[in-house]
Amino acid sequence: MKSKGIAIVLALATLLVLSGIGTLIFLRTLGEIRHSGQDQGIVQTLMLARGAANVGGTFLSTTARQKLEALVRQTASSTNAWAYGGNTSGPTPDPVGVAQALSGLAQQLQVQLDPLLCGVNLAPSGSTAVVRLRVYLTPQACGAPFPGNLRLPPGRFVEGSPRTGTGAAASQTYALPFVMVAEASMGQYRRNIVLQGEYRFTVGRSSFARFALFTNVHTPPNGTEVWFTDRTLFDGPVHTNQHFRFYRRPWFGGEVTSAGCTKPGDASCQGQRQPGAHFFGQGFVLAENMQPSAAQPSYTNGYGTHAPEFTAGVDWNASFIPLPQNSQDQKTAAQENGLYYQNDILTLRLSRKCVNDTTAQEVPCTLPLPIGVTKYQYIEVTYCSNSQCNTTSSQTYRYGEDGILYQKGSGSSWQQVQRRGNPVRFNGVIFTEGKVQGLLGPGRTDPNNPASAPPALAEFAQMTVAALGDVRIGNDLKYETPPCSGVPTRKPDGTVAPPTCDNLSVRNVLGVYSQNGNVWISRDAPRDLHIHATLMSARGVVGVENYNSIPAKGSVYLLGGIIQYYYGAFGTFNSRTGQNMTGYGRAFTYDRRLLQGLAPPFFPTTGQDRVTSVSVFSYGQREQIY
């Protein structure tokens, strides 16, 4: 009996021990589950906060850049040696003056950025989280004071050269210090990331290449009225020094600006400044009288509703922008490290070719390029040997990725071009004191299929063809790697589908520029012509030769922009059907790289300052758990 009692006691003791162990295991398991839930909440809010910080970096590089661009145009000096910092002599501006000027710029930019960020929840759709982002360029953002023990140092000059005030394209880089706060909360969990750094921006002379369309006088030379209609679809910046005319609902995907000059001159406004526009059946309306507002004017009359769509805003009182008075910059560049001609160029053919280095034979440019095959940009020129052009000469040049220029000799030999005892690294400029009677790319293998035209510019080629006189384009001029595809298209519901521009890192770019003549699309050019270039005439038009008498030839598919003194005609159309009767229709796509600061080499500049690039530098971040 005694042994049985002892056994019962031992059994009970064992049960108690096991029960205690089980309780401890259970409590520990509950603790681990609780900690696991806490860890999960911390990790989720951390990832959301980091995501918001990444969004902030993108925001500063895109949307904030556009706001900064507009403010720089208003605040930067275009005549002083320094955009910010006065007209001091020496290699750098006055630091106190820079700090004061950039402090004012930061305050204005803060006012622009707060409405875009304050109160916006950046959390994914359907999430219970709240994600906020603030960017401090001043001691206060979104009504919240500056965080913690951080401070904002004054804005500063980073690097650059003084300008002469004459339009030289010297660039200057400045820095606005910033603090970015990204906060994420989910239930009781909250994560906070504070990032400190500099928002650097480079100020340079604005290139005319940034415009999708620019006119000094918004009519043809004969004064015929030009109306933007439902068929008008421009997806880049549009400017005139005069006035626009609107019929129905033209669409603009970029900023629209008008200087409102009644009589634009060559170098300045020679008439009155009347900010406003013409609306069909309504006449001219001053901007201050536009209904319901100057930002979104709309008029309905017997001819329909005339309400242009300004998706990126409109400025009826923009600065007058004079076109260049000469082409000296392009001439000088061509004489130094480009190609310069005194007389007319009869034909100028641009082409991309691939060559077997061993056999010197041209081979297909298949990717990836086989070993022993090199890709070149070819330039073939036939030009007048004298002003009477009773004798002609021909030259063939080529260069590769390194830019070193070679000229073809006898047979298949190539000689490196030397100037002043040094090899020429081609700067991309071809200039003639006369005309370019035929600017050509490689011919189509199928005359009816523009896709069969090989590229005119290799993927690495950046070129400007400039002339004092006319430039005539004779066939397709295509990039090897286009940045965009498609054209803006109005959908059945009335909205506009923009083109696809998802290849903006490509380098090939072409500018065509006439100082005193016109840029013509030849009357003999093929149907559905494809031109990848920015086309500019400082005194004439960009248009189609004999546009009102040649047969209908489909459309000109332009990837780039047009800058011209007068508005150039491309064809005539049946007003009832919208079909072109003679010449070409317009199917224009804006090269969005040009809005980011890219331009053809030595392309004319406007004399105004703009932001040519921005960069975000982070000097460190800290994370906090609440």
Image: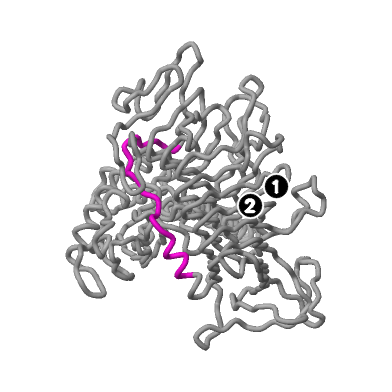
Q: Which amino acid does label 2 sit on?
A: Ile
Q: Quadrant of the N terminus?
A: bottom right
- The residue positioned 29% from the left and 26% from the top of the image is 288
Residue 4's x, y, as percent?
65, 58
Q: Which residue is drawn at 65% across and 78% down?
A: 407
Q: Tell whether label 2 touches label 1 (CB within 8 Å).
A: yes
Using a 10 Å C-alpha cutoff, classify the residue at mark 1 as few (fewer than 14 neighbours), some (14 to 19) or many (20 or more).
some
Q: Which mark is residue 525?
A: 1
Q: Give the mark nearer the N terminus: 1 vs 2.
A: 2
- Which residue is identified by label 2? 473
Q: Where is residue 244 in the image (x, y as percent from the top left)?
A: 43, 32
300 with respect to 161 (left or right): right
Question: In x, y percent, where is residue 170?
Answer: 36, 66
State the image quarter where residue 394 is shown. Answer: bottom right
Q: Where is residue 553 in the image (x, y as percent from the top left)?
A: 71, 38
Q: Is residue 364 magenta?
A: no
- Residues drawn in magenta: 312-333
As drawn, 77 above or below 89: above
Residue type marked 1: Ala
